[in-house]
Amino acid sequence: FMTMEASQAIETSKKVSRIGSMVADLVTQQQTITAADLDAIMQIGNSTLQPYNRSTPEIIITAIQVTDETTPKVLVVWSRKMVGSAFSAATAKNSITKVPPALEIKGTFLIRVESNLAYQPIITWSVDSEKRLGLSSAFDSISMGETYYLRPRRSPTIPCSTC
């Protein structure tokens, strides 16, 4: 059982990583975008987890502008998230955020996609979500996640009119 569970956890971790990569790739191909477009793209990302359905992923897409000032600021232009099947704004517009130092280049625009999942091993899962004795106390969930940064491909920025 442990070998099967380990291989399934590795495969699910790859899928969580693939969500971030695919969602970032789809967003950066756009010249402009809307909140409805972002929601649809996140839903596509969510579908890559199938048939795994014991927990729901969290996907956060954030557009980031690095100002061209002497001391650049890293500002959120727009942000959107999906938790389960609920969509909402994520980080407040014009708030300060962080990016890796290598990406903090004056006057640039980035898309950050974070994909997270609290993986529930099948050996601890029950249909009625009731805790069982044994392995469920040792392995409640395993945190999986990935963060991707990409630059727009077809325009210098990607404005979102409804975000």
Image (tube, grey):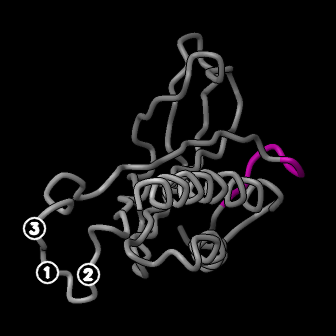
Is 129 left, or right, of 2 in this rendering? Answer: left
Identified by mark 2, the residue type is Ser
Q: Which residue is mark 3?
A: 133
Q: Earlier in the sequence, mark 2 or mark 3?
A: 2
Q: Nearer the viewer, residue 2 or 61?
A: 2
Q: Residues within 10 Å of mark 1 (few under 14, many from 20)?
A: few
Q: Which residue is mark 1?
A: 130
- Up-down relation of residue 126 to residue 42 (above or below): below
Is 98 left, or right, of 132 in this rendering? Answer: right
Identified by mark 3, the residue type is Leu
Q: Residues within 10 Å of mark 2 (few under 14, many from 20)?
A: few
Q: Residues within 10 Å of mark 3 (few under 14, many from 20)?
A: few
Instruction: Give x and y (percent) for residue 87.
Output: 44, 76
For the point 59% across and 10% down, the residue is 70
Q: Nearer the viewer, residue 89 or 93?
A: 89
Q: Which residues are magenta?
A: 153-159
SS label for mark 2: loop
Answer yes or no: do the residues labelled 2 and 3 have beta carbons within 8 Å? no
Q: Which residue is mark 2?
A: 126
For the point 41% across and 55% down, the residue is 2
For the point 29% across and 74% down, the residue is 125
Q: Nearer the viewer, residue 11 or 58?
A: 11
Q: Residue furthest right?
A: 154
